[in-house]
Image (cartoon, rainbow, N blue to C red):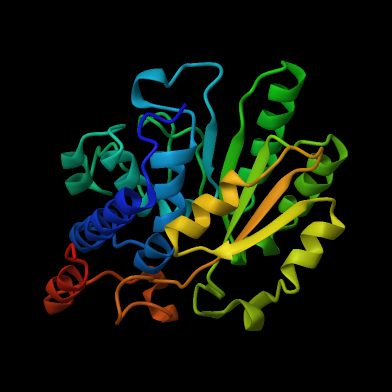
Amino acid sequence: MNPYNYDVSALEKVTRAVRRHIILLNANSPAGGHTGADLSQVEILTALYFRILNVSPDRLDDEQRDIYIQSKGHAVGCYYCVLAEAGFIPLDWLETYQQPNSHLPGHPVKQKTPGVELNTGALGHGLPVAVGLALAAKKNNSARRVFLITGDGELAEGSNWEAALAAAHYGLDNLIIINDKNNLQLAGATRDIMNTDPLADKWRAFGMEVTECAGNDVGAVVGAIEQLTRKGKPNVIIAHTTKGAGVSFIQGRPEWHHRVPKGDEIELALEELKDA
């Protein structure tokens, strides 16, 4: 059971707090960050940690807990901000992001950060591990579900499609893959760098049950996840998002892939993200 089980109104309040954390976390980082990618997935992670996942800070070793994997490892800033809001790590740790000896390095590291389940960063590693975890849960008759977020640019990595074949072959309906489909990667549009469309058709061809939703609408994300049923197929949710969502001068702009707010941009962003 999720310890929060927030309704949509409460979830929306959390998303605003998380976005404020993201701005400050990246602005204060000595090594920069991935502001656009962090902002893209706020609603997805908020829905998971404050409504969906059967996991809590006091049950990190529970063998029945749900597993979340941040396969899109460079967007770890959002992950840390959600873990802090959910009580897995202290809020003041966010001030140490990417500093020497910090608990919060530039990619997820299980040995450093409570709540992190897998070290990720090299794209394409998360799904193969998630498949193994979901298969183990099946064999152990566990109620565990395994969730992960992938970037749409990440799907150019062939390891994802090998893992998808195995997931479908073993009928891993306890596996939920969420594509953060913001249509941008690194320096440009995904369609220009390595086109993955028609993405839903590809997943279905690999044997997946596919749902699509508005990924920056937390209510839509919750609805998409909660309507999933176990039909003997792995589940894919294509969450259509905007890179940099929530901040007008960041959203939809590829240069914010690895850029952080500076100077007046910090206050401008925080002003836009004030609670209504």
Q: Is residue 125 visible?
A: no
Q: Left or right: where does residue 60 sit relative to residue 178?
A: left
Residue 15 is situated, as x and y percent measured from the top left of the image, at: 32, 56
| Along the line of sight, the residue nearer the viewer: 185 or 171 | 171
| Along the line of sight, the residue nearer the viewer: 94 or 198 | 198
Q: Residue at x 18, y 77 (%)?
A: 265
Residue 181, picture quadrant: bottom right
How many numbered discs?
Answer: 0
Which image quadrant: the C terminus? bottom left
Residue 156, picture quadrant: bottom right
**Height in image: 47 above or below 187?**
above
Residue 134 is situated, as x and y percent measured from the top left of the image, at: 69, 31
Residue 213 is situated, as x and y percent measured from the top left of the image, at: 58, 63
Q: Left or right: where does residue 106 sit relative to residue 270?
A: right
Q: Residue at x 61, y 76 (%)?
A: 190
**Height in image: 73 above or below 90?**
below
Q: Left or right: where does residue 274 sit relative to residue 247?
A: left
| Along the line of sight, the residue nearer the viewer: 262 or 83 | 83
Residue 98 is situated, as x and y percent measured from the top left of the image, at: 28, 49
Q: Is residue 131 visible?
A: yes
Q: Residue at x 52, y 44 (%)?
A: 120
**Height in image: 156 above or below 104?**
below
Q: Left or right: where does residue 151 sit relative to residue 17?
A: right
**Height in image: 114 above or below 68?**
above
Q: Residue at x 64, y 44 (%)?
A: 176
